[in-house]
Amino acid sequence: MNLINITSVTKIYHTPTKEIKALNNISLDIEDNKIMSIIGPSGCGKSTLLNLITASEKPSTGFIRNNQPIMIGYMMQSDALLPWKTVYENAILGLRLQKKVTNDNINYVNDLLKKYELYEFKDEYPSNLSGGMRQRLSLIRTLAIKPNILLLDEPFSKLDLETRKNISDDVYKIIKDLHISAILITHDIEEAISLSDEIVLLSKRPGTIKSIYKLNFTEKEIPSIRRKDEIFNRLYDEIWRNFDHV
Amino acid sequence: MKYLIAYMMKYGETLIMSNEHKRYLRKLKLNKMLITISQISLLIFFIVIWEILSRYNIINSFIFSSPSKIIETLIKLYRDNNLFIHIYTTTIEVVIAFILTFIIAFLLALALYSCKTLKKILDPFIVALNSLPKVALGPLIIIWLGTNTSSIIFNALLISIIVTFMTILNGMESCDKDLIKLFKVFGASKTDILLHLIIPSAKKEIISSLKINISMSLIGVIMGEFLSCKKGIGYLILYGTQVFNLSLVMCGILILSLLSFLCNIFINILEKKLLR
């Protein structure tokens, strides 16, 4: 079943000197329980598309329809943790803002903190955490509100390669465990192949859909296993050839 | 026992100290002591030299006064029941100006942060008011409000408000855009964003604004007292100049320095409490 339908969406930004077409005629169906990656060169409108899905911006033409009530979980490039709040307070931030701090939800957050090895740091401040721990906390905060769709806006781009690979495995397992949908924005082809069920390749600005790749990995093939698969390299070469290098 | 073990595990590193670390801590302590002793010695040296130069008529004690004469004047002011009246008057005026400035500047910053159009409309007026030498408005303030405490506080407000407000607004505007986006995605209202994100993230700038505000309020109050007043440290300095009692002027400056020093201590305590 489709969670979100994006139909003929175009986005134009207006500045005093010119108008910039960021996206052109994008039509996409975001399926339930699937991970979709949107890749393309810098400035092709990937983050704009995410802003349209979160409704923080409106499309210039076309429309976006949610087929069921959606609860969005959003992870961005920076871990966006509040430095003046403790690990625990950061973890329940979304619940607090949505006024959903119930005993059940608190227990859920505590379970997540235990599961991702942050429970013993719950009274520490984010400045005392490593890069990987901060990103895990950011993910826990996102999951605390029990989203049915996760939007990941290059969430691993600021991490070192090792942490990045480990957290990719973690995120993949979580998404599959919770049976939720996810949209990953990245310019890293390897990351897209290792995590996704479907890859949407955008052209350079104004972003249009160049190709859609359906991936046939099994659910057990977590990112680190996929990277060793022979199909991985074949797909990488194919996408690399179609990628608009700027 | 359980708690002791937990404590040992958490702070074990600091409890079991290597000799090298002990040496480092000793060096740190010595350095701190050296700085404090040097500061006190420098002050004593300055006071002694001043006293000697004045006592042996190397400098004119009538113009430059001397530490002993300043102390005499202080004792005389105290005996005449004048000392604390002046200190109290100036302190109260500074406190009122400081609080009023902060409240108005904070509300103004909040309004201009929330309404960008209002900010654009008021921008040229704020720039003009900021660059205007406020002392030029002194005579007007006296005509409008009279020679009383209100005109002194108003003068201090004029001097401190723009720079305080600009510092707070700057802090609010430098809030991480990713965080604002995150709050919006979580469905936070504008009030939530202001209360739980914008204001806490501007905490450092708000504290800086307090530091600027307290010194500006002090300057404004003294300037106001120069213009229109019969009480206060500013008046004491002005009166001393008019009757050529330079010891009284120096006495006023000394009290002012102490007051400014105490104000800074107060702000530092506040900073530590707020940034905890």
Image (cartoon, coloured by chain):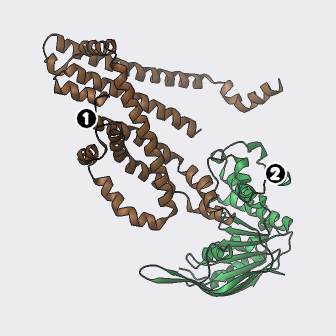
Chain colours: A green, B brown
Q: Amino acid at mark 2?
A: Ile
- Residue at point 73% right, 48% down? A88
Are callouts 1 and 2 both on one chain? no
Chain containing the residue with disc 2: A
Is residue B155 placed above or below B244 in the rendered structure?
A: below
Quadrant including the C terminus of chain B = top right
Q: Amino acid at mark 1?
A: Phe
Q: Give the camera-side residue of B264 and A187.
A: B264
Q: Is residue A16 visible?
A: yes
Numbered disc in front, either 1 or 2: 1
Residue B215 percent coordinates (x, y):
37, 38
Chain containing the residue with disc 1: B
Q: Which residue is mark 2?
A: A106
* 10 Å crowding of disc 2: few (<14), some (14-19), many (20+): some
Quadrant including the N terminus of chain B = top right
Is residue B198 placed above or below A41 in the rendered structure?
A: above
Residue A100 percent coordinates (x, y):
78, 57
Q: Is residue B260 visible?
A: no
Is residue A56 placed above or below A167 in the rendered structure?
A: below
Residue B275 percent coordinates (x, y):
56, 40
Mark 2 and mark 1 in contact (Cβ < 8 Å)?
A: no
Q: Which residue is mark 1?
A: B226
Q: Give the camera-side residue of B14 and B87.
A: B87
- Residue at point 73% right, 43% down? A121
Q: CA distance from mark 1 to mark 2?
A: 61 Å
